[in-house]
Image (spheres, rainbow, N blue to C red):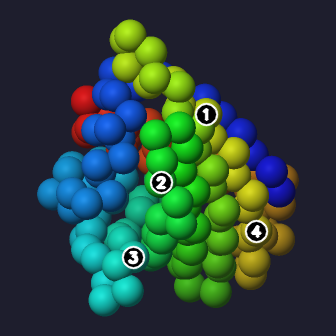
Amino acid sequence: MKLTGQFSSPADVAKLLALDGQLDQLERVPSLDDVRRDSSGRIRAIFTPRATFVPMPFAVVIAVEHAGQSDAALKVHASRGPTAVDVQLKLEFDQRDSGTSVSWHAEVAVRGPGASVGQRVVRDLVSAAIDEVLRETAAVAA
């Protein structure tokens, strides 16, 4: 499924991009726990979106495929039991006087029981979760 969103951050693009190298900053993101870098340079964490009615922590692996002044691309794999979510995330940055406008585009695949059980709501839940973690992450950069 294809999802999109947009938000504004008071942080400039350089501060947003610098988050990849600052695990101490990423640990301040409210929906992320146990943030660490693996031997391949990927970020691993436990992501617990607040968009769900009950806490549903997912183990996530985040790989930065590209990061530039105007855009970035991330590959995210999330799993919770037999449910897996794969996200190809593209971010576009528009630097403004008041900060940065961030547009995001995601190509999402959900597999396992979570895909069928939540088929009526999975689109909204995944979209809300992506938007939530991106906004929270941008907030710690400000």
Nearer the N terminus, badge 2 or badge 4? 2
Indicate which label's residue lies in the foreground, 3 or 2.
2
Secondary structure state at the residue bearing disc 2 = strand
Q: Mark 4 points at which residue?
A: 109
Mark number, residue 103: 1
User: Going 42% across and 59% down the picture, which residue do you hit?
Assistant: 48
Nearer the N terminus, badge 2 or badge 1? 2
Q: The disc labelled 3 sits on which kind of residue? A: Arg
Q: The disc labelled 1 sits on which kind of residue? A: Ser
Q: Do the residues labelled 4 and 1 touch (CB within 8 Å)?
A: no
Is residue 131 visible in the rendered image? The answer is no
Nearer the N terminus, badge 1 or badge 3? 3
Q: Is residue 47 above or below residue 50?
A: below
| 37 sits left or right of 61 in the view | left
* Disc 3 packing (10 Å; few <14; some 14–19; many ≥20): some
Q: Mark 2 points at which residue?
A: 67
x, y percentage for residue 95? Answer: 46, 23
Q: The disc labelled 4 sits on which kind of residue? A: Ala
Q: Mark 3 points at which residue?
A: 42
Q: In which quarter of the image is residue 38?
A: bottom left
Q: Quadrant of residue 140?
A: top left
* Distance between the alpha carbons at the discs numbered 2 and 4: 23 Å
User: Going 66% across and 62% down the picture, which residue do you hit?
Assistant: 88
